[in-house]
Image: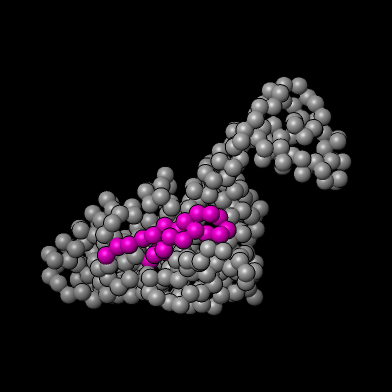
Amino acid sequence: MAERPLSNAEWANATKARPNDQQYVELAKRNDPHFAPPTSGAPGPTNDHKIEWRKYHQQALIATIASTASGKSGVTQEAMVLNGFAAHFLTDAFAAGHLVNKDDAMAKGQAAWKAPSFSGIIFKESAFTKSVARRVLSDPTVAALMAKKQLKEIDWGDVSEQRFSEFIYQISDKKPAFFNAFARLIHDKLNESIKDPSNALEVTNARGHPPWKLSGDKTLSDSPETLRIMQAAVAQSYSNLEAVAKLTATPSDQNRRKNKARRITETDTRNTPGDRLADAVDREPARSKATGTKPRTFRGRVHLREPGSAPRREPRAPS
């Protein structure tokens, strides 16, 4: 009998005894490393799935080199575990909802939220918050509920459109994580895009696979081609470990390789020109119809075989 997956509430309850920043909800907010690199090409304020994949894949390669340098053969269990963890970030690159950079998405949401900005009687509001307040309070069920409530700004008062608009604006000012909601909305919309053939994301990759429709986190069954190419990329990453384990060299040569790999891991885990290891993420810049953002273009030299079958957006003619 298959085990039932735990609900968010159960995870939250299981971690409630931890310090606040280590509880489930707070940990879930810090998911930036599962998204794409910034569209600017410059290192972002947080890591991305490409950086994280390379970091742990390099650690797996180092563990393999260290093992062979000590006289052992084959790929160690430690290297397999590290590479398995790296594969999580590699497979993120094959989910439509992860084709965007989270910080870019939040910044766009924040810009739309605050421009143009107006002053309320006392507190700020914007055209966006005014529209939200108006639409929410126009719902008869919500209006009936809010008629029994009051909002306090300086003094308590009825929940008018203006008060509600100002209240929403204050939340965004006081809670920066509020804009996580914008990234989540984009993530969910892109993941579900494959269900609408007219809006599905068509992608290609550096390996030259014919264009295919990319699925999302919960829609993988809708795209067998995504699954096939993603599995090939993960398999190639394990082949990289096997290739390193089969290298023949003297212990001193292997130690030099190990030390060089360690220096790469420590100093070059950012997306820099001339990537040392296989580059699993390679996309062409093409403006996304759903988000208006450009996926990042990656180029790099490859010392091992490249599992470079991650999707890149297929350019379309202007409509």
Q: Which residue appears at 64% of the width and 75% of the height?
A: 1
Magenta residues (range): 280-301
Image location of residue 251, percent across then percent down = 14, 67
Q: Can you tell which quarter of the image residue 72 is in?
A: bottom left
Residue 215 to residue 125: above or below: below
Nearer to me, 45 or 40: 40
Q: Quadrant of the C terminus?
A: bottom right
Nearer to me, 211 or 158: 211
> In this figure, what is the number of numbered marks?
0
Q: Which residue appears at 28% of the width and 56% of the height?
A: 273
Residue 108 to residue 5: above or below: above
State left or right for residue 83 relative to residue 69: right
Q: Can you tell which quarter of the image residue 48 is in?
A: bottom left
Report the predominant secondary structure element of the magenta stretch.
loop
Nearer to me, 318 or 107: 318
Image location of residue 105, percent across then percent down = 53, 49
Residue 218, magenta (yes or no): no
Color theme of the render: one colour
Q: Which residue appears at 82% of the width and 43% of the height?
A: 138
Q: Is residue 170 visible?
A: no
Q: Is residue 37 visible?
A: yes
Image location of residue 298, percent across then percent down = 36, 60
Q: Which residue appears at 23% of the width and 76% of the height?
A: 246
Image location of residue 312, percent across then percent down = 45, 66
